[in-house]
């Protein structure tokens, strides 16, 4: 077994709330990297491309290039090259579908014609007309994929509706249950394990939502560290609970020091 130590770190509610970094999170990440840990950022955020998150992190001084794993990547892997995909989602999903070699059909197209797959994610422009287009495509036999089922996401001021809220509308209208690609489901687990390319000696997942991050940790064999800076106000039963990412990193580094007998 290798001596690698890896942190799988959620973004929204852990590193930042929308545009505002959570106090102490950036320094904490850099302290962990300086101590020899690898950090991968695991996010259900589907609207923005992975490079957008990497740019934001690197502007804050956190190494992140090629270390973002997001739900659009997992959703795209459920589609086949050449399939005609109705994209009821933002640019992050469209980009990954195009990279996959799919023919991407916008979610507001007047005459979608034959659709092989409908992919739904966070989509601020989503409206009644787009709901009808997605519903008809699913009812006509298109496979139905959701990037994630999170009903909300945290901002610096409040909770806002998440991609799961839009997904629920399409599911209700069509009468069909979607396949979920992102945390904590199997497509995201497969993607994370492939990115790790080996078994670390220590693998920890930190997140603010026990229903997704906690279950994701279990799916990839990671220890779960829960923080109180995002969606969940209370710690899940049986999980290590911490005020914020700074306290998680302190806990990890203190535990390493104790293991060495320093």
Image (cartoon, grey):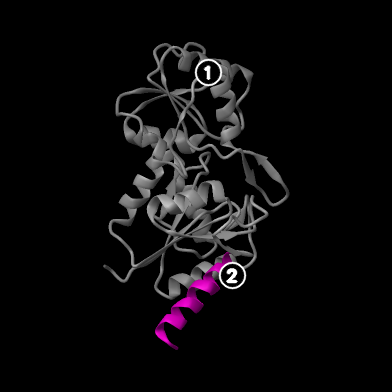
Residue drawn at the location 31% of the way across and 71% of the way down: 3
- Indicate which disc residue 247 carries: 2
**Residue carrying label 1:** 175
Left or right of residue 66, residue 49 in this image: right
Query: Is 234 or 173 nearer to us in this picture?
Result: 234
Do tag 2 and tag 1 residues touch (Cβ < 8 Å)?
Answer: no
Query: Is 91 or 243 nearer to us in this picture?
Result: 243
Left or right of residue 173, residue 70 in this image: left
Magenta span contains residue 256: yes
Residue drawn at the location 50% of the way across and 78% of the way down: 254
Residue 257 lies, with reference to residue 225, above or below; the image says below
Residue ranking furthest to the right: 157
Residue drawn at the location 47% of the way across and 71% of the way down: 32
Q: CA distance from mark 2 to mark 1?
A: 44 Å
* Quadrant (top left, top right, bottom left, bottom right) of the C terminus: bottom left
| Residue stretch in magenta | 245-262
- In the rendering, at what x and y percent does residue 252 appear? 49, 72
């Amino acid at each position: 077994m290798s001596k690698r130590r890896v942190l799988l770190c959620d973004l929204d509610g852990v590193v930042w709330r929308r545009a505002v970094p959570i106090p102490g999170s950036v320094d904490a990440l850099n302290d962990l990297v300086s101590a020899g840990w690898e950090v991968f950022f695991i996010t259900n955020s589907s609207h923005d491309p992975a490079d957008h998150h990497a740019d934001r992190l690197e502007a804050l001084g956190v190494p992140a290039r090629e270390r973002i794993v997001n739900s659009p990547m997992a959703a795209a892997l459920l589609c086949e090259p050449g399939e005609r995909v109705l994209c009821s989602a933002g640019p992050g999903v469209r980009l990954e579908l195009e990279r996959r070699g799919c023919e991407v059909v916008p979610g507001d197209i007047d005459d979608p014609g034959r659709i092989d797959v409908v992919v739904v994610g966070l989509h601020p422009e989503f409206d009644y007309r787009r709901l009808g287009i997605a519903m008809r495509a699913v009812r006509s036999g298109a496979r139905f994929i959701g990037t994630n089922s999170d009903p909300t996401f945290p901002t610096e001021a409040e909770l806002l509706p998440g991609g799961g809220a839009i997904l629920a509308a399409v599911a209700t209208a069509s009468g069909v249950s979607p396949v979920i690609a992102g945390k904590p489901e199997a497509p995201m687990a497969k993607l994370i394990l492939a990115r790790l390319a080996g078994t670390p000696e220590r693998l920890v997942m930190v997140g603010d939502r026990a229903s997704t991050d906690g279950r994701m940790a279990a799916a990839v064999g990671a220890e779960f560290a829960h923080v109180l800076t995002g969606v969940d106000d209370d710690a899940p039963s049986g999980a290590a609970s911490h005020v914020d990412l700074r306290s998680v990193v302190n806990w990890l580094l203190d535990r390493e020091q104790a293991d060495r007998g320093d």
